[in-house]
Amino acid sequence: MTERYIARSSAIAARMLGGEMMIMSAVDSTFFTLNEVATIIWQSADGGTSLSEIVEKVCREFEVEPDSARRDAEQFVDELSRHGILLISDKPIDNPSTRPTEAL
Amino acid sequence: MKQQWNRSSQLCRRAEGPWNASKYEGNELSPAIQTHEVAIEIGGIPVLLRTEDASFRDLLENRYAGFVSRTARPKFEFDVDVGPHGASTDEDLQVKIQAGKWLLWRGDFNSEWDPRAGKGWIRQSANPYSIDSVLRIVHSLILAREGGFLVHSASAIRTGRAFLFSGLSGAGKTTISRLAPSDVTLLTDEISYVRRDGEGYRACGTPFAGELARLGENCSAPVATLFFLEQGPKNQIRPISSADAVRRLLRNILFFADDPDLVKLVFRSALDFVTLVPVRRMTFLPDERVWELVD
């Protein structure tokens, strides 16, 4: 399977509130709230950590089968990338503009 | 040798204040042009509208009666060209920033506004809905930079504190406004004006009326609670999660601009508001007892 790398877009605003990560696309104003697992994926999306490593991290913290976690993570990143919230590449993403615009 | 041009020899110039006064301007060289100035102060932010159309001035002074300021020095000025500029309010509104200037247009008006210079112009028909829309847009843009917003919400002051009742059309904003007892000061039944005020927020009266067709009072108070209205079998206040509160608030904030930076600002304002102000769900029956829950 091709490895994937994910990075947070700069065209978003995000903040943790009441224990939930909230994200808004500055491009199409779509608003998302993330659960705990999705928040780990989001916070790990630094462009340099592969999705496989992120899924391993999720599996260490939650009782979940690796295949199931991988499938859910793939769906999650695909959906956020469709709204321009996450950037996806088959190589590490080294772009300062991908840093989040708000403190996580 | 040509004479040097100076301001005093301009063919026509505008006099400085006093605001709202009708001024006869011009000099021997120019045709007589009478301009009329009306400063409309909403949320403590006066906006000067300047027109050569006396009947439009009268329309402004009547429509915004309690919000016409005779003393405040306006921070923003607009020249309003009233004429046959189209009357369709059905076209989609567009608001964009270009080279530091906001461009606003719809079927019934177009406008340009330079927020740094504090100046702009509006071309519209003699239609009160057009100027109402421009004022809402301009104030929403001003507030976004300050951490505030306009929100679909009735608001009212009771015992020195402001309460907001938010919801889309049909949620009950006008109904709860109509049921307000006599000790309540109504700020608006349709669009609330919310400004950042230290570690909290302040709700200000607006002339943007809904079905009640009554201007709000031109005063303000610190926001105590935001209620999201719902139709229900009894009068009841219930908690709401932060995420749901932010989601509902974002849905009700008036936001017109196609501008990613402003989207981020509005998002931050909504989260700051939910962090600092209690937010609740309110279901109510359409009778005055609902106000027993508000104090």
Image (cartoon, grey):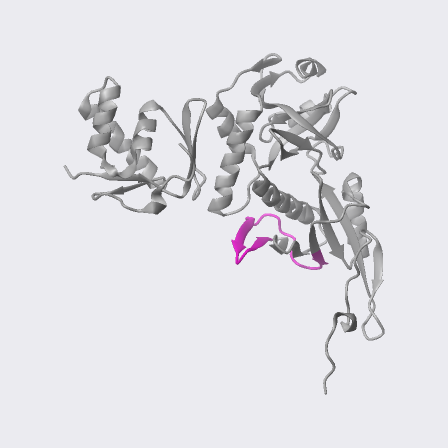
Relative to B97, is A6 on the left or the right? Answer: left
Most extreme residue toward the bottom, as rendered?
B1
Residue B48 percent coordinates (x, y) = 73, 51
Q: Is residue A53 magenta?
A: no
Is residue A18 in sight in this rendering? Answer: yes
Residue B74 percent coordinates (x, y) = 73, 49
Is residue B231 in sight in this rendering? Answer: no
Relative to B40, is B223 on the left or the right? Answer: left
| Looking at the image, residue A20 lies above or below residue B290 | below
Picture residue at 29% right of the left edge, 32% below the top: A44
Q: Compare residues B208 and A48 and report the one nearer the observer.
A: A48
Q: Compare residues A67 and A18 and report the one nearer the observer.
A: A18
| Looking at the image, residue B77 lies above or below residue B280 | below
From which residue to which does the magenta span run? B79-106
Picture residue at 85% right of the left edge, 74% below the top: B28
The quadrant of the picture occupied by the N terminus of chain B is bottom right
- Choose top left, top right, bottom left or bottom right for residue A21: top left
Q: Is residue B87 magenta?
A: yes
Residue A85 percent coordinates (x, y) = 36, 39
Q: Compare residues B52 and B55 and report the one nearer the observer.
A: B52
So how many labels did they put on this image? Answer: 0
Picture residue at 16% right of the left edge, 39% below the top: A2
Most extreme residue toward the left, as rendered?
A1
Relative to A44, is B209 on the left or the right? Answer: right
Residue A89 percent coordinates (x, y) = 24, 43
| Looking at the image, residue B278 lies above or below residue B190 | above
The quadrant of the picture occupied by the C terminus of chain B is top right
